[in-house]
């Protein structure tokens, strides 16, 4: 599925605060999600409909995939801590 990745404004702001090296890794993962949103370390979240998380090192990308519209909506990008989930 080749589509588009839509990153929420709050996720963009949080991404801008991460170190440059980590920003590059996350940006590469977002580009890869355009080609195949289900490739990589992705787990569907329990109790959430159509939401999943992708692990990039110590960061997590929370997203929802709309197959009909061919879009991936990134809701949040956070650093993994004991309170992330």
Image (spheres, rainbow, N blue to C red):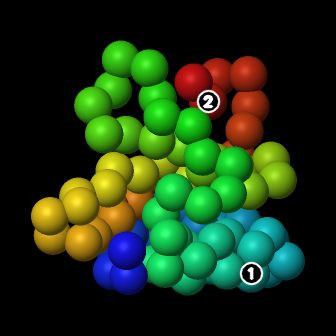
What residue lies at 64% left-to-right and 22% top-to-bottom?
83
Q: Give the x, y percent position of residue 2.
A: 38, 82
Q: Secondary structure at mark 2?
A: loop
Q: Secondary structure at mark 1?
A: helix
Residue toward you, 84 or 16: 84
Gap in angstroms between the C-alphas marked 2 and 1: 21 Å
Label 2 environment density (alpha carbons within 10 Å; few <14, some 14–19, many ≥20): few
Q: Is residue 27 left or right of residue 13?
A: right
What residue lies at 47% left-to-right and 64% top-to-bottom?
37
Q: Is residue 42 left or right of residue 76?
A: right
Does label 2 or label 1 sit earlier along the sequence? Answer: 1
Q: Residue furthest left?
A: 68
Image quadrant containing the N terminus: bottom left
Residue toward you, 38 or 9: 38
Residue 1 visible, this orientation: yes
**Image height of 71 relative to 57, above or below:** below
Q: Give the x, y percent position of residue 66.
A: 23, 58
Q: Give the x, y percent position of residue 57.
A: 82, 53
Q: Which residue is mark 2?
A: 84
What number is the disc on residue 24?
A: 1
What residue lies at 49% left-to-right and 79% top-to-bottom?
35
Q: Quadrant of residue 23?
A: bottom right
Image quadrant containing the C terminus: top right
């Amino acid at each position: 599925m080749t589509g588009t990745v839509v990153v929420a404004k709050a996720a963009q702001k949080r991404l801008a605060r991460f170190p440059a090296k980590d920003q590059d890794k996350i940006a590469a993962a977002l580009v890869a999600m355009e080609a195949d949103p289900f490739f990589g370390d992705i787990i569907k979240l329990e109790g959430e409909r159509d939401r999943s998380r992708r692990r990039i090192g110590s960061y997590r990308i929370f997203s929802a995939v709309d197959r009909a519209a061919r879009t991936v909506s990134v809701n949040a990008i956070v650093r993994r801590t004991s309170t992330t989930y």
